[in-house]
Image (cartoon, rainbow, N blue to C red):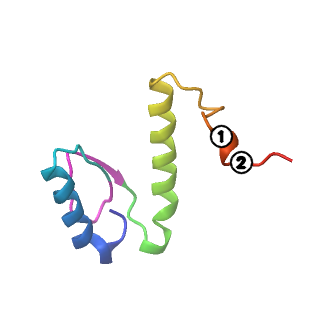
Amino acid sequence: MTQSELQSKQVSNIREVQSRGAIVLTFVKKSLVKNGECSFELPDLPDDFMAIPSIIALQLLAYYVSSDKGLDVDKPRNLAKVVAVE
């Protein structure tokens, strides 16, 4: 939840997936209301700049989840299908 204008829609989507039994990880701007079972606070920046800290946080999450699962983070599976090498 990084965009103030979309907060009500995001809260609605979070409630919908929670009602179906999902665990929700929320990256939320400090000034917005926290929703979800696990919230990570991001710095309070203007909406236009919120992509930067949220992308970094999501990349770190992906790295540590992959590492904990024992996957090679430097050579992801099926990488050749989406990357052309010349």
| Residue occupying the far left of the picture | 19
* The magenta segment: 27-41
Disc 1 residue type? Leu
Relative to 10, 47 lies left or right: right
Quadrant hosting residue 65? top left
Q: In the rendered image, which residue does mark 2 sit on? A: 83
- What residue is rendered at 22% in x and 72% in y? 8
As measured in the structure, the alpha-carbon distance from the residue carrying label 1 to the one carrying label 2 is 6 Å
Relative to 29, 72 lies left or right: right
Relative to 82, 49 lies left or right: left
Secondary structure, mark 1, is helix
- What residue is rendered at 30% in x and 60% in y? 30
Whether residue 36 appears in magenta in the rendering, the answer is yes
Residue 86 vs residue 40, the one in the foreground: 86
Badge count: 2
Question: Which mark, by number, is residue 79?
Answer: 1
Whether residue 1 appears in magenta in the rendering, the answer is no
Residue 61 vs residue 86, the one in the foreground: 86
- What residue is rendered at 59% in x and 31% in y? 73
